[in-house]
């Protein structure tokens, strides 16, 4: 491993050494953080998609139940959907 490159800065009167981008350990940490962040984004997107799908499925189910009025089949028309879309 090469020697970490450092930069010194002053924070509230205290000199602090900061490891810079040339350090292998820093690059490894940055890679791990990037991977965790990307994985989190994917998982969050998947979770949202699941809930959106469930929401629209439930809306469709409720519309069918309303339109069928308990019957096995319903005669569909555009009037109900047009009315719902306006509201």
Image: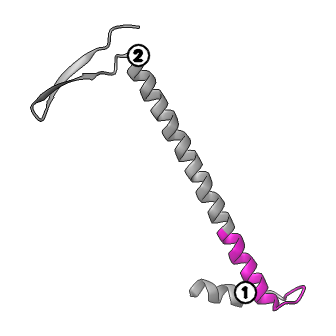
Q: Secondary structure at mark 1?
A: helix
Which residue sits at x=13%, y=29%? 14
The main secondary structure of the magenta stretch is helix
Residue lying furthest left in this view?
13
Q: Is residue 17 visible?
A: yes
Give the image quarter of residue 87: bottom right
The numbered mark, 1 or 2, whose residue comes first in the sequence reads 2
Q: Is residue 32 above or below residue 47?
A: above
Which residue sits at x=57%, y=87%? 86
Q: Is residue 29 above or below residue 73?
A: above
Q: Residues within 10 Å of mark 2 (few under 14, many from 20)?
A: some
Q: How far across and down, in percent of the image, does residue 33 sit?
A: 45, 33
Q: Quadrant of the N terminus?
A: top left
Q: How far across and down, in percent of the image, does residue 70 sit?
A: 84, 90
Magenta segment, which residues? 55-74
Q: Is 22 a magenta residue?
A: no
Give the image quarter of residue 26: top left
Q: Is 66 a magenta residue?
A: yes
Drawn side of residue 29 relative to residue 7, left or right: right
* Residue denoted by label 1: 78
Q: How far across and down, in percent of the image, does residue 83 sit?
A: 63, 89
Return the residue nearer the eye: 53 or 80.
53
Q: Is residue 77 visible?
A: no
**Disc number at residue 24?**
2
- Distance, label 1 to label 2, CA atoms, is 64 Å
Which residue sits at x=75%, y=88%? 66
């Amino acid at each position: 491993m090469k020697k970490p490159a450092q930069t010194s800065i002053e924070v509230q009167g205290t000199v602090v050494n900061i490891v810079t981008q040339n350090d292998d350990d820093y690059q490894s940490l940055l890679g791990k953080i990037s991977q965790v962040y990307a994985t989190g984004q994917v998982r969050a997107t998947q979770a949202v998609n699941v809930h959106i799908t469930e929401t629209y499925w439930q809306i469709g189910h409720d519309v069918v139940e309303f339109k069928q009025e308990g019957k096995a089949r319903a005669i569909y028309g555009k009037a109900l959907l047009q009315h719902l879309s306006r509201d």
